Amino acid sequence: MFDSSGLLTLHYGKHHTTLIDEIHAWFDGECFADVALVCEGKETLRAHRLILASSSPLIKLVLHETPTTESPVIIQFPGVRAADMRVLLDFLYTGQAYVQVQTRK
């Protein structure tokens, strides 16, 4: 379809869905991951700068101040269990997460 200035407009109706599916697949497969999140017990999860920086102003600042020659960027999270970080990453990448509700007595 051409607009009034003679430019051809291209439209892919499944763009957003496809992009989200690809990002989720990259996370699951740790493809192109450029950040290492080191959690309690030195357990490491891999993620992507773009996703983390888009989700957190603090992480964005940390990544901005980190030289881009370092790959992966290593961010330490002492006292954070890898299972808890994984839930947070699931939420950041997919917009949803399943959290186990614990009852305390």
Image (cartoon, helix red, strand yellow):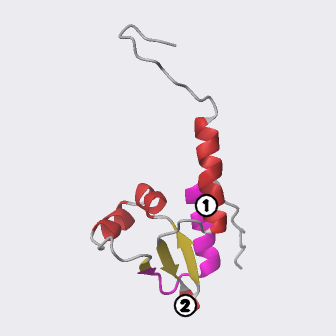
Asked if one can make out residue 43 in the rendered structure from this viewpoint, the answer is yes
On residue 1, the disc is none
x and y percentages locating residue 33 in the rendered image: 52, 68
Q: Name the residue rendered at 44%, 76% in the picture.
A: 72
Q: Quadrant of the C terminus?
A: bottom right
- Vertical order, 58 against 78 (above or below): above
Q: Name the residue rendered at 66%, 67% in the picture.
A: 29
Q: Name the residue rendered at 49%, 77% in the picture.
A: 36
Q: What residue type is labelled 2?
A: Lys
Q: Identify the residue at the far bottom of this view.
A: 41
* Label whose residue precedes the other's in the sequence (1 or 2): 1
* SS for callout 1: helix
> Toward the viewer: 91 or 51?
51
- Vertical order, 72 against 15 (above or below): below
Residue assigned mark 1: 26
x and y percentages locating residue 14 in the rendered image: 64, 34
Q: Which region of the structure is painted magenta?
A: 75-95
Residue assigned mark 2: 42
Q: Marks 1 and 2, how far apart in space?
A: 22 Å
Q: Residues within 10 Å of mark 2 (few under 14, many from 20)?
A: few
Q: Identify the residue at the far top of this view.
A: 4
x and y percentages locating residue 73 in the rendered image: 41, 76
